[in-house]
């Protein structure tokens, strides 16, 4: 096994809204960039943007492609981890049928590439940086979508194609549920994913008779606009109240499925609004759980959880 303490590795966090790329020497971060995920028509365009960003951070660090010992990608799903491809991502353009990652990036860098679901990558990073990680834990992200990475009895679950614990597609409302980006109805992500919150607010407006200051008719209306009006707008408060209910219900289902001792919560929606997203779950979860209630916390890795996961994946693949 190769000692990776001084090797140059590249980590990639590919999200539906943003992507981040970092280069590190061992555990020392050398440089990083962040960009909006391109509104591409093909997956190959997304891949090319990632390769360009890798070249950018390498140049900023005074390195070239030959220095790279391994690349790790924490990515949106669904995935085929054997081929290293994202398949029909629900929160990107419908024209994107797949995003090839491992093959093109590996060819460009001349280095091995490991691709995992973004929440699994974040979970691996957290566990690698804990002195004594609990054998049963989960990382749950509330971002553009909702997802999870889970460890049971000390084993990180990956499942077929790397798609274990796709909790965002738990069905929470089987009858007349809201449409999810995947094309099905009633999924957790349809209510709690950042991409879906604006339309959820618009649907609530139809049954709401009071006034609202939310700019529901504006194309720029986004999830952060709802949270910004908390305590000042009745419709915003109604949505946030319902969001807490859906999130607690979804997490209760996760607890009953995997029995984690610890749940770390990440993703921009949660981390930028902890009092409005994390605390309501903490309050609502215990009555919904028939087994033991796990410890709940915001991820100590903050917004870098998946990026740190990408770097950890790169260290693992470089050591193989």
Image (cartoon, rainbow, N blue to C red):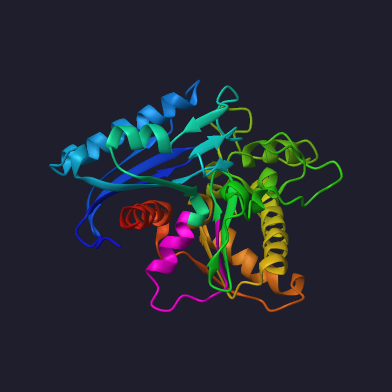
Q: Position of residue 290 (x, y in %)?
A: 77, 75
Residue range corresponding to the magenta coloring? 121-140
- Whether residue 131 is situated above or below residue 151 in the rendered picture: below
Q: Nearer the viewer, residue 79 or 246?
A: 79
Residue sitting farthest toward the front: 1
Percent from the top left, x then y, of residue 64? 17, 38
Q: Is residue 253 left or right of residue 279?
A: right
State the residue at coordinates (66%, 72%).
Answer: 259
Horizontal side, residue 234 vs residue 32: left or right: right
- Height in image: 191 above or below 4? above
Q: Is residue 234 visible?
A: no
* Point 15% across, 42% down: residue: 63
Q: Is residue 128 magenta?
A: yes
User: How many numbered marks, from 0 up?
Assistant: 0
Quarter of the image containing the N terminus? bottom left
In terms of image quadrants, where is residue 214? top right
Q: Is residue 311 above or below residue 254?
A: above
């Amino acid at each position: 096994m190769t000692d990776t303490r001084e090797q140059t590795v590249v980590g990639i966090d590919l999200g539906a809204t943003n992507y981040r790329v970092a280069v590190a020497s061992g555990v020392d971060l050398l440089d990083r960039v962040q960009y909006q995920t391109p509104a591409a028509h093909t997956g190959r365009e997304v891949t090319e943007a990632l390769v360009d960003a890798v070249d950018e951070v390498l140049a900023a660090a005074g390195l070239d492609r030959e220095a790279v010992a391994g690349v790790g990608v924490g990515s949106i799903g669904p995935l085929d981890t054997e081929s290293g491809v994202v398949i029909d991502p629900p929160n990107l353009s419908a024209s994107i049928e797949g995003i090839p990652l491992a093959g093109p990036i590996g060819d460009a860098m001349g280095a091995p590439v490991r691709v995992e679901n973004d929440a699994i990558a974040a979970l691996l990073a957290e566990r690698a940086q804990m002195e004594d990680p609990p054998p049963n834990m989960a990382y749950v992200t509330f971002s553009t979508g909702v997802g999870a990475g889970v460890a049971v009895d000390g084993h990180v679950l990956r499942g077929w194609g790397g798609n274990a614990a796709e909790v965002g597609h738990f069905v929470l409302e089987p009858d007349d549920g809201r449409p999810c980006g995947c094309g099905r109805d009633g999924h957790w992500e349809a209510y709690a994913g950042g991409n879906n919150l604006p339309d959820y607010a618009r649907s609530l407006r139809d049954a709401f008779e009071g006034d609202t200051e939310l700019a529901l008719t504006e194309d720029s209306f986004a999830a952060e606009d709802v949270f910004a009006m908390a305590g000042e707008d009745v419709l915003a408060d109604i949505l946030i109240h319902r969001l807490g209910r859906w999130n607690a219900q979804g997490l209760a289902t996760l607890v009953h499925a995997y029995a984690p001792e610890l749940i770390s919560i990440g993703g921009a929606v949660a981390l930028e609004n902890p009092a409005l997203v994390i605390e309501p779950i903490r309050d609502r979860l215990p009555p919904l759980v028939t087994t033991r209630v796990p410890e709940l916390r915001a991820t100590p890795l903050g917004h870098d959880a998946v990026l740190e996961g990408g770097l950890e994946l790169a260290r693992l693949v470089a050591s193989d």
